[in-house]
Amino acid sequence: MKVFILKKRKDFVKAAQEFKVVVNGLVLQAALNLSEKAKDCCFVGYTATKKLGKAHIRNRTKRRLRAAVAMVFPSLAKAGVNYVVIGRHNTTELEFAYLTRRLRDAINEINAQIEARQQSPSEAEEKL
């Protein structure tokens, strides 16, 4: 599946309001994208706040997140979903294989949340 970059602030804000998973090294947020051009692809945005440190640290954090997303998202991301990956204080220090495992766990959890919300209420009650 193709993965495109989120660029508009409103898409980042919408993702922050819908689904969220926090794991060691990153935060993953998601929102459904109902536009026609998002039917067979997903969008990803990256964030690293000034709390992380100076510009070179924020840049390294986003580079590592982009590399991890390039490995994980083509096979696991759901079409029609906007994802936002947020770097945390230890993203640059974690071993890269561990970071990709945590991203894989986070995307699986987000996808489960999305599927649970898309089910009808009666089906959700049956699973409980």
Image (cartoon, rainbow, N blue to C red):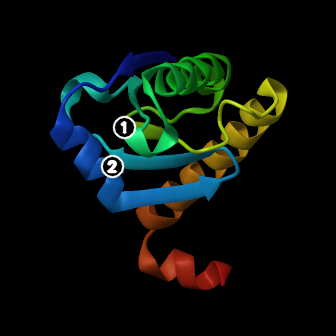
Residue 43: image x %, image y %? 37, 27
Q: Amino acid at mark 1?
A: Asn
Q: Is residue 87 above or below residue 106?
A: above
Determine if residue 49 is in view.
Answer: no
Q: Quick one: SS at disc 1?
A: strand
Q: Give whichever of 81, 61 is nearer the camera.
A: 61
Asked if disc 1 and disc 2 are in contact, CB closer than 8 Å, the reply is yes
Q: In the visual, does 87 lie left or right of 105? A: left
- Quadrant containing the C terminus in the rendered view: bottom right
One can see residue 84 in this view: yes
The residue tagged 1 is 82
Q: Secondary structure at mark 2?
A: helix
Query: What residue do we see at 16% from left, 42% from top?
Result: 10
82 vs 26, nearest the viewer? 26
* Cα–Cα gap, marks 1 and 2: 7 Å
> Crowding near pointer 1: few (<14 within 10 Å), some, many (20+)?
many
